[in-house]
Amino acid sequence: MVVLTLKKPSHTLSQRISLLCMSMAMPFAVLATDLSDIAREGEKKFAEAESSQAKIDELVDGAQDRLIRYRALLKQADGLNEYNQQLSTQIEGQKDLLQRIDKSLSQVALIERQMSPLVSTMVHALAKFVELDLPFSVGERLQRIAFLEDSLVAADIDVAERFRQVIEAYQIENEYGRKIDSYQAIIDLDGQRREVDVLRVGRLVMVCQTKDTALVGRWSAEDKRWELIDNITYRSAIRNGIKVANKQASIDILTLPLPAPEVAR
């Protein structure tokens, strides 16, 4: 027969509960410590992540700014290339223009060398023409000839200006042939110095009449002097012509002693 011996437990119930609670509390304390460390580590990682993100954002913003500047520089470079092409075209055009100008200057120099003797000849021809023409406005016309002759030897007057002056003088002489003019003068008529009214009709005829209308005369281009003409025939016509020249009467038909045409030789 087996006899069971029951031993009294060494710990009471309260002691066992206390031991159990202690054994259960220990893992929770360890867990709390781990969670705190994890939290701090997480905060650290988050801060690092934020810092990294800020750097990334800064890099992205910088990259965008550089991209914008790069595109602007590309556009500016394109504009500069186009401008350079335009300048190149303009430079080539200016080179062609300079070549044409050089050629023109050479031609101008040649023309100037050819014009100088021409201008001189025109002045001498004009002087001879005035000498042989009807003797009206003699002082004014001779003064103009003297001015042209002085211009021929003036160092500060170029050939173009000389030519312009000569052409202007020719134009003035040309206008004389289209006008009816009247003026007073003292001339030799019938062997005496007499004060007369002179009537000039272009270059066709030049006649005169004394103040008392007693004598009338005509310039003889052949004899280079004033000669008497018939007073009865021409006195009224000359008087009317003088009024027309002075704008005291309207233009009318005048009967004047024209010189006979010269026979061609």
Image: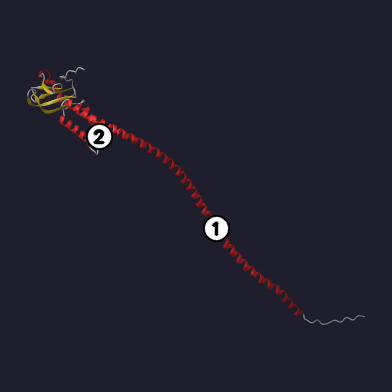
Q: Position of residue 20 (x, y in %)?
A: 74, 76
The residue lying at 19 percent from left, 32 percent from top is: 145
**Callout 2 crowding tier (Cα within 10 Å): few <14, some 14–19, many ≥20:** many
Q: Tell me: 89 left or right of 21.
A: left
Q: Residue at x 59, y 64 (%)?
A: 48
Q: Amino acid at mark 1?
A: Leu
Above or below for 26 versus 247: below
Q: Is residue 249 visible?
A: no
Residue 113 placement (x, y as % from top left) = 29, 33
Give residue 246's quadrant in the image.
Answer: top left
Tag on residue 96? none
Q: Are marks 2 and 1 in contact (CB under 8 Å)?
A: no
In whole angstroms, how far apart are the C-alphas of marks 2 and 1? 79 Å
Residue sitting at the far right = 1
Crowding at dot 1, Cα within 10 Å, few <14 / some 14-19 / many 20+, comes out as few
Question: Dot 1 corresponds to which residue?
Answer: 59
Assign a secondary structure to mark 2.
helix
Image-based side of 159 in relation to 210, left or right: right
Residue 23 sits in quarter: bottom right
Residue named by callout 2: 162
| Residue drawn at x 60%, y 66% as measured from the top left | 44
Q: Camera-side residue: 151 or 70?
A: 151
Q: Residue 52: x percent and y percent?
A: 58, 61
